[in-house]
Image (cartoon, rainbow, N blue to C red):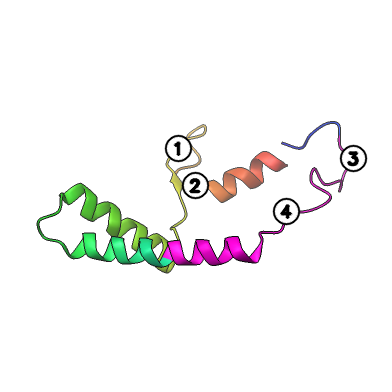
């Protein structure tokens, strides 16, 4: 819900998101490469714990293809079932 202390259209962060320094971006990119290699190695390791292998597969799928939309399966007065979180947020914002 909107903050009652703000006027319509007023941002809670007028300066925007802080800029990430280039050297930090470089370190994050290197770390991402290592994480991807680790997940691939874990996924391909038949001796690894199955829970770890599944987690690696989920991470690779989420970062490679994007996370799927989350679904809320609910019943409101017998009318709504299987609604996405995105829809709930839009309804909540109204």
User: Residue 25 magenta-drawn?
Assistant: yes
Secondary structure of residue under mark 2: strand
Residue 40: % across, % down: 27, 66
Quadrant into which the N terminus falls: top right
Q: Identify the residue under disc 2.
A: 83
Residue occupying the far right of the picture: 7
Please report whichever mark, 4 or 3, sits nearer to the chain's N-terminal start. 3
For the point 50% across and 39% down, the residue is 79
Residue 39: % across, % down: 29, 61
Q: Are marks 4 and 3 in contact (CB under 8 Å)?
A: no
Disc ID at residue 17: 4
Front-most of residues 9 and 25: 25
> Label 4 to label 2, Cα distance in Å?
30 Å
Q: Tell me if I can see residue 70 in this picture.
A: yes
For the point 23% across and 50% down, the residue is 52
The magenta segment is 6-32
> Label 1 to label 2, Cα distance in Å?
7 Å
Disc ID at residue 74: 1
Which mark is nearer the camera, 2 or 3?
3
Secondary structure of residue under mark 4: loop
Please report whichever mark, 1 or 3, sits nearer to the chain's N-terminal start. 3
Residue 18: % across, % down: 72, 54
Which mark is nearer the camera, 1 or 3?
3
> Label 4 to label 3, Cα distance in Å?
20 Å
- The answer to whether 19 appears left or right of 7 in the picture is left
Q: Is residue 34 above or below residue 53?
A: below
Q: Residues within 10 Å of mark 4 (few under 14, many from 20)?
A: few
Secondary structure of residue under mark 1: loop
Residue occupying the far left of the picture: 47
């Amino acid at each position: 819900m909107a903050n009652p202390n703000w006027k319509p259209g007023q941002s809670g962060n007028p300066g925007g998101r802080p800029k990430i320094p280039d050297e930090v971006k470089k370190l994050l990119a290197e770390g991402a490469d290592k994480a991807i290699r680790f997940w691939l190695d874990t996924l391909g390791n038949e001796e690894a714990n199955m829970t770890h292998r599944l987690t690696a597969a989920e991470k690779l799928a989420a970062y490679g293809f994007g996370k799927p939309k989350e679904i809320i399966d609910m019943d409101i007065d017998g009318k709504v079932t299987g609604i996405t979180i995105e829809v709930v947020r839009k309804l909540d914002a109204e």
